[in-house]
Amino acid sequence: MSGDWLSVAAQNIDWAPFMRMTQYLGAGLAMGLGAIGAGVGEGYNAAATVDAISRQPSAAGDLTRVMLVGQAVAETSGIFALVMAFVLIFLTPVPCAEAMGAFLGAGLAMGLGAVGSGVGAGVAGARAAAGIGRNPRTRGHVTIMMLLGQGLASSPAVFALVIAVVLAFAQQFQKYVGNDPVAAVSAMSAGLCIGAGAIGPGFGAGVAAGGACEGTARRPEANNQLMRVMLVGGAVSQSTCIYAFVIAFILIFFI
Amino acid sequence: MDIIPNAPVQIWGLPFEGFNVATLYNSWLVMAILITLALLVARRLERAPGRLQVIFEMVTEFFEDLCDSTLGKEHGRKYLPFIITLFLFVLFSNVIGTIPNVLAALGWPGFYCPTQDLNTPLGLALIVFFVVHISAIRVKGFREWLWSFFEPSFPGDRPITKGVGVVFLVLGAWLNYLLISGYARSFAQASVARKVGGGLAAGLLAALSVMVLLFALQRGRVPNVVMAPLNVVGELGKSISHPFRLFGNIFGGFVILTVVSHLILYIGIPLILIPFFGFFIGLVQAFVFAMLALAYTAVQIRE
Amino acid sequence: MEDAIVKAAALLGAGLAMGFGAIGPGVGEGFAAGKACEGVSRRPEEASLLTRTMLIGQAVSESTGIYSLVIALLLIFLFGK
């Protein structure tokens, strides 16, 4: 560790109150930001369903059922954020500067990381509802396509959760127990990196899934080709999220 | 919570410390299962197929259709066995971790997804990388393959585009030199010999790119040297994202199951989550892995 | 030896570069994939052509993500170590 003023200052502070503060702040960030995506996505899904019912009242039962299934999946990222908030509140880490950075990073990772996936899964559900409203007979195919697409759209949130869990439980592996300011900032930076990096790909995969759902409703016999294009396109659009995941791993394990 | 179970073992008297035994044994198990199934099906092929044969025929037909439509008839047949093996291996590797340890009485250490260890997806992606680029060289020829890293190139038939191309060429050679020598210097802070070596390598690379440029000028196109390092990084980026996508999803499922099980002590929710993350995500990611290998090949060999 | 604060800033910059740099390509490539799906539903017989075009377009729109990756790696390994 270098002997400059920042490192010396980090040695001479009592971190215990700051640690509790960071835990609560991290939990707040995780749940507060994490609720945005699921909320917006589910609302969008519900709005599209209402719109479709007003056009096609006879399919109201089917549409409501599909909406509830889609909303339940879109809620996944919100539930990840909830779990992470509980973990951050109830863990009892050794108070130190690095753990502070790690907990703030974990909160940012899960909070920001849940936004894109929640909105994306909601967009997929909304466009599935629009498709079913136009062509109610294709309900089965569209629902399967919607679930596949939402599963794909929630994998950025899964990446964010992995980094958040690694950051939160790092002290179990004797990591983040010192007061090096560089390590503290790198932990926070890792969380910010994967959190922000998961926003775009989650939303993008959701848009891809939405296109596939509408396409299936328009032409159910092209189901297989559509599934293929959606899976490849959605997976490729996640590669930037995976770069962020790799950078976060480097920031955690190679600094 | 042991994320990477490491156990010191001895194999034929040699210590294998820090070696992930669970990955090794479980990937052997997956291979054994796949070979046994394939032999069972191939031994008794019948006109009126049994249940196992129907499943295998469905999978084969699906991928045959996929390979043919993506790669064209003549290449599709060649890559079918590779793609289908990749899919089946990844699928079984993703699913095997969901089985509870029913073989504990026989001394089996426990079922564990080999894909949950980063080394397995990395190895598979390395295979795909070599297959993609070697087949690109075989189909397009070495020169065209090399050229693909200097795209988008400038047509050399008009003086304006040619001039812009030459400016880009000089600029790019200089930029490449700066980048590479900067990199080499940062790694070579330790010794003078390394610094000289790095400088020489950077100079050689810059000279090489200028040579490629001059050679290409004669052929009527001016390569885009500024894009060359970015194209190389982009190509490597594909090979980074390919394994990490699989690893992140499978490892993420494991992390979620572990955290949720610790939080609520095995009530209810894991029973829903295990099939979701084990089978659904496992199947989707296995398909995505094989499909991306196919797509990377298609982009390289079909222009 | 450099100041700890400089290293910390480089690492924070790497995280910011890759994190925010990943948003745009992710959304853009998703739009490409969505439009490709719509195209396939209109003309299923052109699926392989559409897929290839989509992949090429995505590769181009991913280049900004790759720039972010390069910058993040440079910041980490040149200035953050």
Image (cartoon, grey):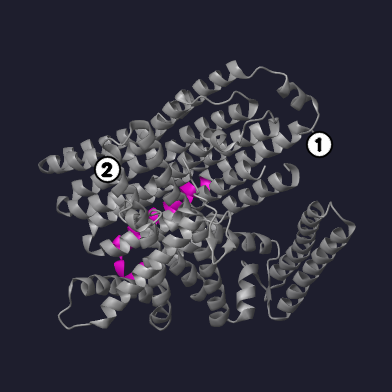
Q: State the mark number for residue B272.
A: 2
Q: State the mark number for residue A194.
A: none
Disc 2 residue type (three-letter)? Ile
Disc 1 residue type (three-letter)? Glu
Q: Secondary structure at mark 2?
A: helix
Can residue A199 be spotted in the picture? Answer: no
* Image quadrant occupied by the N terminus of chain A: top right
User: Circle 1 is placed at which residue position?
Assistant: C2
Q: Depth check: give the residue in front, A198 or B17.
A: B17
Residue B53 drawn at (x, y percent) = 23, 75
Look at the picture and state if B44 lies above or below B6. below
- The subunit carrying tag 2 is B
**Image mark count:** 2
Q: Is B174 left, or right, of A96 in this rendering?
A: right
* Residues rendered magenta in the picture: C24-47
- The subunit carrying tag 1 is C
The residue shown at (21%, 36%) is A50
Residue B192 drawn at (x, y percent) = 89, 57
Residue A65 drawn at (x, y percent) = 18, 40
